[in-house]
Amino acid sequence: MPFELPPRFWQKTQEEDRGYETPCLTWTAYRNKENYGRFSFEGRKWLAHRLAYVAANGPIPDGLEIDHLCRNRACVRVSHLEAVTRRVNLLRGTGFAATNAQVTHCPQGHAYTPDNTYVQPRTRQRDCRACKREQEHGGRPASADRTHCPQGHPYDEANTRITSKGFRACRTCDREGGRERMRRTRARRNSSQ
């Protein structure tokens, strides 16, 4: 239930233009190390912005916290305060979580799409699946993405066969490899005679 704050609360504020839509009402009295104003009211110590919000809007709903839309932690102007979830508050900020959430592509330029993104369960870190595939194949694209065999022969319909294990194999390399094996076998036989 909203209530009236005492005049001594408002005496500790000063209007200050910080570039937001309307000027901030900055707390000029004691501030803690995080730059939030502190105020004692009815035997309880409050963060000044939370007290201003509660006085104007009633209790802060469970699971929500107060976000400064103006990004000024010392501001107590109620129109600059909004009750939001912790996640929303963090993502609106300028910290690591907010900065990282704005990244849409990996350093190699692959988009962080649901299909191309793996989120590590323990750390919640995002990994690019395309980069992981390339890393597993020595910097080369994954087998399905390759258009030529390691010797440079094209993987086309006439030159490609599927092995018993389901891998692609180059028919030209098979023929050349067979010829090379035959040549070595003959050379061994000739040298042993």
Image (cartoon, rainbow, N blue to C red):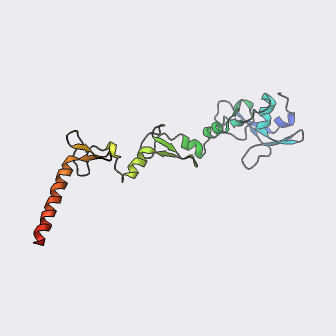
Q: With respect to residue 161, does 180 lie above or below?
A: below
Q: Nearer the viewer, residue 70 or 156?
A: 156
Left or right side of 141 for 71: right
Residue under the point 61% across and 37% down:
92
Q: Is residue 33 above or below residue 1?
A: below
Extreme-right residue of the structure: 43
Q: How far across and how far down the image is residue 53, in percent?
A: 77, 33
Q: In the image, residue 72 lies at what x, y percent?
A: 68, 39
**Total marks placed:** 0
Q: Is residue 187 left or right of residue 95?
A: left
Q: Which residue is rendered at x = 42% and y = 42% of the image?
A: 110
* Pick the front one: 143 or 10: 143
- Image quarter of the N terminus: top right
Q: Quadrant of the C terminus?
A: bottom left
- Choose top left, top right, bottom left or bottom right for residue 41: top right
Q: Can you say whether 126 is above or below 52 in the image?
A: below
Q: Is residue 102 left or right of residue 182?
A: right
The residue under the point 17% across, 51% down is: 175
**Residue 141: % across, % down:** 34, 47
Q: Nearer the viewer, residue 54 or 123?
A: 123
Q: In which quarter of the view is residue 66 placed?
A: top right
Q: Residue at x 12, y 67 (%)?
A: 189
